[in-house]
């Protein structure tokens, strides 16, 4: 055994000597120089792209803030509360569009969230490899489908065929159309969040005698709650920003909706329609204010959901730590009883 150990150590010494000699050769130095050049070029390119993107975003925000915030404080009652003028539709306040946007978000999430959660949970936790690959590919294809195509499908099915809301143009038709867009987006995000949970969590839950359903609902989902809520934020922003599918199924009415079967305009469709059909100063002011309100709305939603996710995560981690402390205390008391009996 000692002779074999000596042979192994001699081999390791030879290998280390050869490696140290290779590091001094010109060939290695050339390769290292090329790596430095490539790494520097990639770093400079990425930094430049990030700088361009941030500069573009800062320019847009500056234009919106300069043109919108002043109007927001100067003409708050006119831009928000003033009833819609029947002669000049774009001169009314944007309060109806805010209400329509909120109703559309609520109804779309009510339809989309259960479906997306069921699909993502089935793909990750229950489906076989063949079914998982097929459904994942189907979700990816649906995500990459142009939204105008889905808008035309919603127009043909919910507006022209079923005529939801009487005329067909309604918040319900728009919500069902957006659900076709949002469900794959949510399912893809939920799937990534569930996949990020370590497999050891599931195995530990099974070892404690928990069922598959209990493991998913009490271990996997709470561990992935941050990613799930981030996906919901992205979905809400997607709902707010969609314009063409919403115009095709919601219509362009400027009146305040009283239910899910009414027509209306969202903030994004109001920006689109106002700037497309009217170039007056009043229409431009209203469009800028709509942009400011949309950005503010998304920011508030981000802060609220971030707070909720941090609270849930801390609560979940607190329970885990508390359980570990209880287990350690139980072990200590058990060991104390065993030592007392032995003595």
Image (tube, helix red, strand yellow):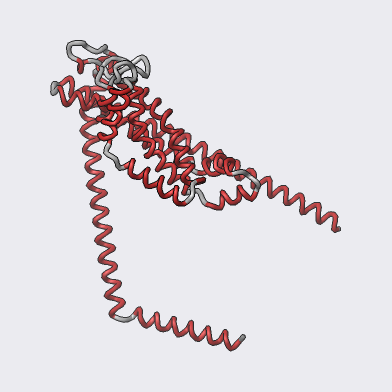
Classify 88 as above or below 236: above
Q: Nearer the viewer, residue 78 or 178?
A: 178
Which residue is rendered at x = 73% and y = 48% of the image? 330
> Where the C terminus falls, by quadrant?
bottom right
Res. 283 visible in picture: yes
Specify whether 87 is left or right of 200: left
Classify 324 as above or below 2: above
Q: Which residue lies most toward the front here?
A: 161
Q: Which residue lies most toward the left here?
A: 279
Quadrant in the rendering for residue 269: top left
Classify 267 as above or below 181: above
Res. 69 visible in picture: no
The picture places residue 73, in percent across and down from the top left corner, at: 27, 21
The picture places residue 212, in percent across and down from the top left corner, at: 58, 44
The picture places residue 101, in percent across and down from the top left corner, at: 33, 24
> Where the N terminus falls, by quadrant?
bottom right
- Count every numbered label the image shows and give the total: 0
Q: Nearer the viewer, residue 143 or 102?
A: 143
Quadrant in the rendering for residue 326: top right
Which residue is rendered at x = 27% and y = 30% of the image? 245
The picture places residue 252, in percent across and down from the top left corner, at: 24, 20
Specify whether 339 is left or right of 72: right
Specify whether 337 is left or right of 206: right
Which residue is rendered at x = 53% and y = 40% of the image? 314
């Amino acid at each position: 055994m000692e002779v074999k150990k000596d042979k192994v150590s001699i081999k390791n010494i030879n290998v280390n000597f050869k490696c140290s000699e290779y590091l001094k050769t010109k060939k290695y130095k050339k390769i290292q120089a090329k790596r430095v050049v490539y790494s520097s070029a990639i770093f400079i390119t990425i930094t430049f792209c990030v700088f361009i993107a941030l500069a573009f975003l800062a320019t847009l925000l500056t234009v919106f803030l300069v043109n919108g915030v002043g109007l927001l404080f100067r003409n708050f009652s006119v831009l928000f509360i003033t009833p819609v003028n029947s002669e000049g539709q774009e001169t009314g306040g944007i309060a109806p569009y805010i209400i329509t946007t909120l109703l559309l978000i609520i109804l779309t999430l009510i339809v989309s969230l259960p479906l997306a959660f069921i699909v993502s949970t089935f793909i990750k936790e229950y489906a076989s490899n063949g079914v998982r690959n097929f459904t994942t590919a189907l979700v990816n294809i649906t995500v990459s489908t142009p939204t105008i195509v889905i808008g035309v499908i919603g127009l043909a099915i919910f507006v022209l065929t079923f005529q939801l809301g009487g005329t067909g143009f309604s918040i319900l038709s728009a919500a069902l159309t957006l659900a076709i867009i949002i469900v794959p987006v949510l399912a893809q995000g939920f799937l990534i969040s569930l996949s990020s949970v370590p497999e050891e969590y599931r195995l530990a839950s099974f070892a404690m005698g928990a069922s598959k359903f209990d493991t998913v609902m009490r271990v996997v989902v709470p561990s992935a709650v941050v990613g799930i809520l981030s996906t919901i934020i992205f979905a809400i922003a997607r709902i707010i920003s969609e314009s063409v599918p919403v115009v095709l199924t919601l219509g362009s009415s400027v009146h305040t909706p009283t239910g899910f079967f009414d027509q209306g305009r969202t903030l994004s469709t109001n920006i689109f329609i106002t700037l497309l059909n009217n170039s007056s100063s009043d229409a431009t002011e209203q469009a800028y204010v709509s942009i400011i309100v949309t950005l503010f709305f998304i920011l508030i939603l981000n802060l609220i959901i971030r707070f909720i996710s941090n609270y849930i995560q801390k609560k979940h981690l607190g329970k885990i730590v508390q359980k570990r402390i209880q287990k350690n205390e139980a072990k200590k008391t058990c060991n104390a009883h065993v030592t007392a009996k032995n003595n």
